[in-house]
Image (cartoon, rainbow, N blue to C red):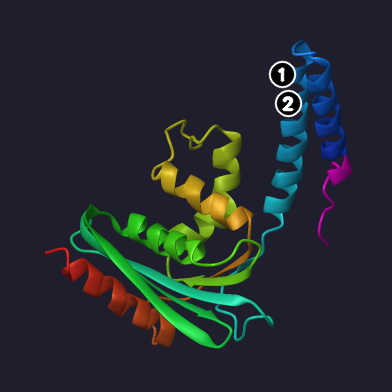
Amino acid sequence: MSRPIRVPAGELALRLRRLADRLERGEARAIETEVEAALKVWDDAQEDFDSEREVVRAPAAAAPGGAVRIWCDGSCSPNPGPGGWGAIIEANGARRELSGGSPASTNNIMEMTAAIEALRATSEGAQVEVTTDSEYLRQGITQWIHAWKRNGWRTAAKSPVKNQELWRELDALASIRAVRWHWVAGHSGHPENERCDELANAARRAQG
């Protein structure tokens, strides 16, 4: 059973209304306190929402009606070295293929970039099913990221999180869409995953 959000959404609106009233009255000293309280309410609500993101270990047989489906993959050889990424977006019965590369990257960066670029190509508020063969990507966005954010983007060992800028961007994109993350084994004959691998490798080879 899903846990309810601890703080009602109306509480955030109330605090923001109070802040606006004080701004109109010129009570500048109260602004900082009200902003901090409003942000705390938002953080509590967002944490509960994030904790309920569903993790699915196998690819879905079919997406819910109206959902956008994304498959994505990254490639880097040697690692680190020239990299490429590829993605397929399926929506309203039509498919698009996206790809790109970098002359100096890592496999993890390319995996994340594929998901970021594909999500950017979808509308805010969209229902999205993302399938990847990267456990780094899937577990990072569905599990590890919550602790990283609580710890100021540091790991349990107090080290800065690697690829932090990309994780922040991916989190921001996912937060304004209803995203479900799926995993599929790479090079297992999954047609869309195999095609994304081809796109990623072609983009990598194009880096020279």
Please state which amino acid type lies under the numbered disc 1: Glu
Q: Is residue 190 visible?
A: no
Please state the horizontal and vertical placement of residue 67, each as a whole percent of the image.
63, 77
Disc 2 and disc 1 in contact, CB within 8 angstroms: yes
The residue singled out by tag 1 in the image is 32
Residue shown at the point (34%, 60%) measured from the top left:
110
State the SS at label 2.
helix
**Quadrant where the image shows the C terminus:** bottom left
Residue visible at 41% across and 58% down in the picture: 112
Please determine whether, in this image, residue 14 is positioned above or below residue 105: above
The answer to which image quadrant residue 88 occupies is bottom left
Q: Amino acid at mark 2?
A: Val
Which quadrant holds residue 164? top left
Q: Is residue 131 left or right of residue 179?
A: left
Q: Is residue 156 left or right of residue 43?
A: left
Is 4 included in the stretch rendered in magenta? Answer: yes
Q: Can you tell which mark lies on residue 89?
A: none
From this viewpoint, is residue 147 visible? yes
Out of 73 and 11, give the one closest to the viewer.
11
Image quadrant holding the N terminus, namely bottom right
Taken as a whole, is the magenta stretch helix, strand or loop? Answer: loop
User: Can you tell which mark lies on residue 35?
Assistant: 2
Callout 2: few (<14), some (14-19), or many (20+) C-alpha neighbours within 10 Å? some
Residue 98: x and y in percent read 37, 72
Residue bounds of the magenta highlight: 1-10
Q: Where residue 51 sits in the image (x, y, percent)?
A: 69, 52
Alpha carbons under labels 2 and 1: distance apart: 5 Å
Q: Is residue 52 magenta?
A: no
Instruction: Say above or below: 84 vs 47.
Output: below
Q: Position of residue 190 (x, y in %)?
A: 43, 85
State the SS at label 1: helix
Is the residue marked by circle 1 packed among few (<14), some (14-19), or many (20+) residues within 10 Å? few
